Image: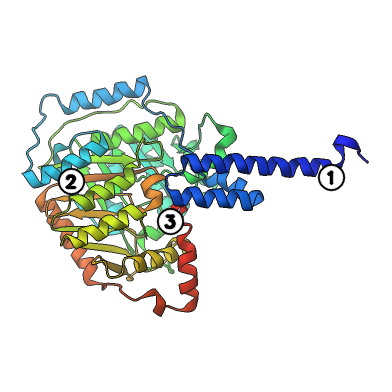
Amino acid sequence: MTSGWFSWPVLISLGLLAFHATAAVFAFRAVRTARTPQGAVGWAVFLLVIPYVSVPAYLMFGDFRYPRTLRDRRLSEITARMHEVASGPGARALDLDPEAARIVHGFEALAGDRAMPGNALRLMADGRTVFESLFAAIRAARRYVLIETYILRDDGLGRALQELVLQKSREGVRVCVLYDPFGSYGLHNDYLARMRAGGIEVVNFHARHPERRLALTRVNFRNHRKIAIVDGEVAFTGGYNIGDEYIGRNPRLGSWRDTMVRIEGPLVGPLQLHFAEDWHWATGEVLALEWRNETRGNVPGLVLASGPSDRAETGGLFFLHAITAARSRVWIASPYFTPDTGLMQALRLAAERGVDVRILMAGRRDHWLVWLAGFAFVEAMRDSGVKIYRYSEGFMHQKVVLVDDAVSAIGSHNLDSRSSRLNFEVSAIFADPEFAAEVAAMLEADFARTEVYDRPLAAAPLALRVAAPVARLFAPLL
């Protein structure tokens, strides 16, 4: 039996004191660094009242900034090379009408890049069409295939991709696959081992990190981007991950409604650059890639990427600019609707200005908390003039924004706090009336399959009336 300083009561008391001291330090930090007053108060109270639960929670979900510095000298060199090619012989001047230019310039400021003309697009709203097009592009690859996905599954679709890229590897094509470990939770090691044995470079986004002692905190920062590049010539981005549910094989979710865009032309370069940055973060390697500036069509566009390492909350500003720049309409399709107060106020003000504001969100659930919280946010927007539609013919997962009659965006940004400030996201923005009309027709077909959801929360079952406001408290993490 120990005595003195080493007795069990003393050790336990010291441990409890350390917990309380740590909680107090974290509470002070939360007050100083939380992005909102509500977050500061919430964390401070939680940490001081229940330190034994809140200290581990703060380590995982607290307001830590992601320590990511990607643009080292070598990456700056390939960035410069991309811009050199983009502005070299064959480059075309950007010619936009004044209204489109007004909207696009705001997105350019957020992206820190300029729009590029000369792109050819294919809008795809069906999973089988998406993967037929993607697999056809991979089969035609001659030099390399780059795939970045939030979800990678060892299922029918995942194994079909596996077989295809293994075949391309045998043909001498380099294949790099980057996946997020949180989104791909449960991915079998056998699946990864077979890929690697066949020469596929498949890497966890968080595989290499200088602060391994704080690796647990990285569960809150997820790479939600969906990018595929073939030979620097064709790119895909949008809402589709690699899993059977994305082609309607999940009986509970039913048919899957999503959107992807296939891109050829100068805009492939910025998407490829963002993949190269993420690959460098995960592996330390600077990829040797092909940079092209071949005109393939007439659509101007730019790429806007955001993440928790940004100086500003670029993801939230992406939506804020779309909403405030709109003069006739802003339509947003996002499966989840848990915006922060600023975005809610912007939506309300746009509707007050006479803008046709529509939100298309998922009616079915894939994640309980975010689905429940959505009811509370919809209730907060009642009588605001904002029309909110719940899609119920299967699961709606697309991330699409349409501003007025000329500017549209397709990518991975959801209208929620996580996409605004915690996830790494990417969207492609296009300034073309014809493509915007195609996006509008696609969304109008979605609206026609549903109706405005204006049922008051007070009329919902008791369980939902209780659970929705509670779930809303967790909105900053959902």
Report how many numbered discs are placed on residues in the image: 3
Mark 3 vs 1: CB contact within 8 A:
no
Which residue appears farthest toward the right when viewing the image?
1
Whole-angstrom CA distance, mark 3 to mark 2, is 33 Å
Residue for point 70% across, 40% down = 18
Is residue 100 in view from this perspective? yes
Q: How is the image coloured?
A: rainbow
Image quadrant where one finds the N terminus: top right
Q: Position of residue 434 (x, y in %)?
A: 10, 52
Q: Quadrant of residue 348?
A: bottom left
- Whichever of labels 3 and 2 marks the residue nearer the N terminus, that label is 3
| The one of 254 and 333 positioned closer to us in this rendering | 333
Residue 73 placement, left or right of 201: left
Which residue position holds label 2? 430
The amino acid marked with disc number 2 is: Phe
Q: Quadrant of residue 28?
A: top right
Which disc, if any, is residue 156? 3
Task: Give residue 306's position: percent from left, percent from top.
Answer: 34, 41
Upstream in the sequence, badge 3 or badge 1?
A: 1
Give the amino acid type for the residue marked by disc 1 in the picture: Pro
Which mark's residue is nearer the viewer, 3 or 1?
A: 1
As drawn, the label of residue 9 is: 1
Report if residue 194 is visible in the image.
Answer: no
Residue 365 in the image, given as x and y percentages of width and height: 42, 66
Q: Residues within 10 Å of mark 2 (few under 14, many from 20)?
A: many
